[in-house]
Image: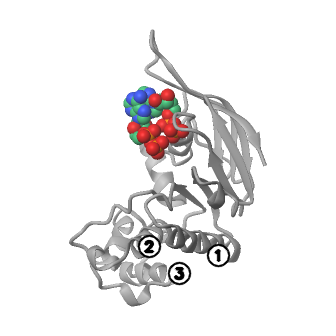
């Protein structure tokens, strides 16, 4: 398994008013799977994605990523794993407005060991993967929403992560553009074997995934 979660619990504000955001999540994601995570607002989707993305630790339970125990690591080790193994895209594109597409994509390489490879070449290759090689020197404001999301996808992939985490990646896009982003995710999943966990409210988008889980009140209530 690429991801194994065993009885993951997350409690916010431990004490008198504690909130059980996740209540014993167990889940396996094999390498190359495209998994959709669904559920109403407040059901724990973001919390789950934060834990998978090594941005937060569970209160209890075990998380293994590619065989490595994650859930007892320090914040510093978590950051290392995040930079090396995980790419993330969000509903918002989070572009630096004064940076070109290429420079936005190259940003994560500032913290990475590129083994002597040129950062600009790696960023260019990532832009080519999302079909935007010809927009490398454009500023974000010169790009459409769909193109900006593709740039943020290139930025997520520039380190060649094993796992892509996507939080409502089509949430800020019109339907047609959203489908184009989904098509690109499916292509990356199928042709490059990229494993994807995507949070979405959108049944039509979730239908493209290999598997769907639905959260409610911090539990997995169904799978299809
Ligand atoms: P979703 O992404 O499905 O909307 P979340 O994971 O954001 O769900 O939230 C799950 C529950 O945890 C909700 O009750 C939410 O209010 C609570 N929660 C999320 N983050 C925090 C936090 N940092 N502090 C306290 N409560 C939080
Ligand atoms: P999403 O729309 O992706 O589900 P949310 O609106 O649930 O995101 O949460 C946005 C951010 O606010 C997250 O980082 C989450 O951890 C935090 N958050 C959510 N609920 C609470 C809360 N009750 N108290 C503090 N922080 C929260």
Dot 2 corresponds to which residue? 146
Q: Is residue 18 left or right of residue 36?
A: left
Mark nearer the N terminus (2 vs 3)? 3
Dot 3 corresponds to which residue? 129
Crowd rating for badge 1 (residues with CA inside 10 Å; few <14, some 14–19, many 20+): some
Identify the residue at image location x=34%, y=79%: 102
Please tell me which residue lies in front, 151 or 30.
Answer: 151
Mark nearer the N terminus (1 vs 2)? 2
Farthest top residue in view: 16
Dot 1 corresponds to which residue? 187
Farthest right residue in view: 224
What distance separates the C-alpha of mark 1 from that of mark 2? 16 Å
Please tell me which residue lies in front, 176 or 67.
Answer: 176
What distance separates the C-alpha of mark 2 from that of mark 3? 15 Å
Crowd rating for badge 2 (residues with CA inside 10 Å; few <14, some 14–19, many 20+): many
Res. 44 image quadrant: top right
């Amino acid at each position: 398994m690429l991801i194994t979660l065993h009885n993951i619990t997350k409690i916010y504000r431990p004490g008198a008013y504690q909130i059980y955001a996740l209540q014993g999540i167990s889940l396996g994601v094999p390498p190359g799977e495209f998994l959709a995570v669904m559920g109403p607002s407040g059901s724990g989707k973001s919390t789950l994605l934060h834990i998978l993305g090594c941005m937060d630790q569970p209160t209890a339970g075990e998380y293994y990523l590619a065989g490595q125990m994650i859930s007892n690591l320090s914040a510093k080790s978590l950051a290392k794993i995040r930079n090396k193994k995980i790419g993330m895209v969000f509903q918002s594109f989070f572009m630096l407005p004064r940076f070109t597409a290429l420079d936005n994509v190259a940003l994560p390489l500032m913290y990475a060991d590129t083994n002597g490879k040129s950062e600009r070449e790696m960023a260019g290759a990532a832009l080519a993967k999302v079909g935007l090689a010809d927009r490398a020197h454009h500023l974000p404001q010169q790009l459409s929403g769909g193109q900006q999301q593709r740039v943020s996808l290139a930025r997520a992939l520039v380190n060649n992560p094993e796992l892509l985490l996507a939080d409502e990646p089509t949430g800020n896009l019109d339907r047609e553009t959203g489908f184009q982003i989904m098509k690109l995710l499916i292509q990356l999943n199928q042709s490059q074997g990229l494993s994807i966990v995507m949070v979405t409210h959108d049944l039509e988008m979730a239908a493209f995934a290999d598997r769907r889980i639905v959260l409610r009140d911090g539990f997995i209530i169904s799978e299809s």
